Each structure stands twice: as structure tokens, then as C-alpha cells.
Image (cartoon, grey):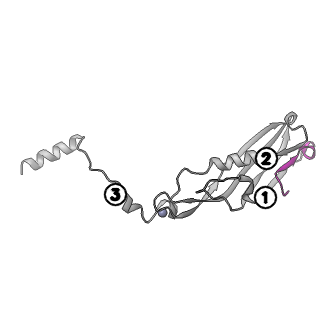
Amino acid sequence: MTDFKIFTERLKDGTIQEVSEEYSADFLDVSEDELCLSHLVQVTGMAYIADQDLIMSLEAKTKATLPCRVCNKDCAIHLETPRFTLCVPLSEIGTGVFDFSKDLREAILLEIPVFAECENGNCPERGELERYLKKPVEGKNSSTETCGNAFAGL
Ligand SMILES: [Zn+2]
């Protein structure tokens, strides 16, 4: 299987088709400046027919490159979809050929985080940023008051 097609005729006798493929990331068709998806997409799962539906159970893994939100350096992150199931009525697959690339693409794009951070979330420049962002703590709770009183007596 080198494309995203499932031939439903071949499954009508109850055959379970294993899916275990690596696809070029081209089908993800992402044209964002900052987001780069160029690693192979590993897809595993299966396809079979139950009653009048084509059932596909799939999971996909790949990597994306995004700029670190702290230092802006490119960082590679793992993308992994949870196993998801497609259920498509055979009546909607008039041609007998189901192309699952669109559903697969959507499932993968859902996993892309809004932010990425290098070094698995421990960007070396994060400390500096946090110091910069730190706000003075306001004494709202009673313990601050008690503390204040204690010191007032000294
Ligand atoms: Zn960073």
C-alpha cells in the first residue's frame, strides 16, 4: 500500500487489512511559515467492514519543527495521535475506494501544539524569561498579616 486508498471490495469477505506504512509528510500540506512538517508519518492500524460500514482504526506518529516560544530556536517535537476510529458507511464510498488521507491529516494536525519549547520544555533561556516576568507578590492572605505582626513586635 503506497497510497491512502482502501479497496472495500477486498474486505467484503471479512478480511481485516493491516495498515503499517510510512508516508511522506507532503499530504499534510501545511504551509505555515513557522511550522515545518517534513518527517515521515508512520501510520499503523487496520481496516475492515462491519455490517454496512468501513471501519478504520488508526494511529499516526511523526515529528514537527516549531520555533521555541522562549528562545525562538527551531525545536523538533513528537506528534502522536491517539488511536482513532473512522466509520464510513459503504453507501458513501460509491467508487469502492476510500481515501483516508483527509481524516488522517486532520487527526495529525489536531496534535500540533500551539506552543513548543526546546529541550523538552526546559529551554535554557526560560530562567531568564521567568525572572523578567516575575511580578511582586501581593500580600493578600492572612499568613502575610501574621508574619507582619510578628515582625512588628521585634
Ligand atoms: Zn528554547
Discs 3, 2 touching: Cβ within 8 Å: no
Discs 1, 3 touching: Cβ within 8 Å: no
Which residue bears the numbered disc 1? 21
Based on the picture, tell me whether residue 6 belongs to the magenta stretch.
yes
Q: From the top left corner, tell me how far across and down residue 124 is, in percent.
A: 44, 66
- Tally of numbered discs: 3
- Residue 46 got which mark? none
Q: From the top left corner, tell me how far across and down residue 24 is, in percent.
A: 75, 60
Earlier in the chain: of badge 1 and badge 3, it is 1
Quadrant of the frame with the N terminus: bottom right
Q: In the displayed structure, would residue 112 be above or below residue 93?
A: below
Report whether residue 16 is seen.
no
Which residue bears the numbered disc 2? 100
Q: In the displayed structure, would residue 112 be above or below residue 74?
A: above
- Neighbourhood count class around disc 3 (C-alpha, 10 Å): few under 14, some 14–19, many 20 upward: few
Amino acid beneath label 3: Tyr
Q: Is residue 135 left or right of residue 40?
A: left
Based on the picture, tell me whether residue 61 belongs to the magenta stretch.
no
**Residue positioned 52% across, 61% down in the render:** 120
**Residue positioned 50% across, 61% down in the render:** 72
Asked whether 30 or 6 is in front, the reply is 30
**Residue positioned 90% across, 45% down in the render:** 11
Q: Is residue 110 left or right of residue 97?
A: left
For the residues labelled 3 and 2, the Cα–Cα distance comes to 47 Å
Q: Give the magenta range.
A: 1-12
Foreground mark, 3 or 2, reads 3
Report whether residue 126 is seen.
yes
Amino acid beneath label 1: Glu
Which residue bears the numbered disc 3? 132
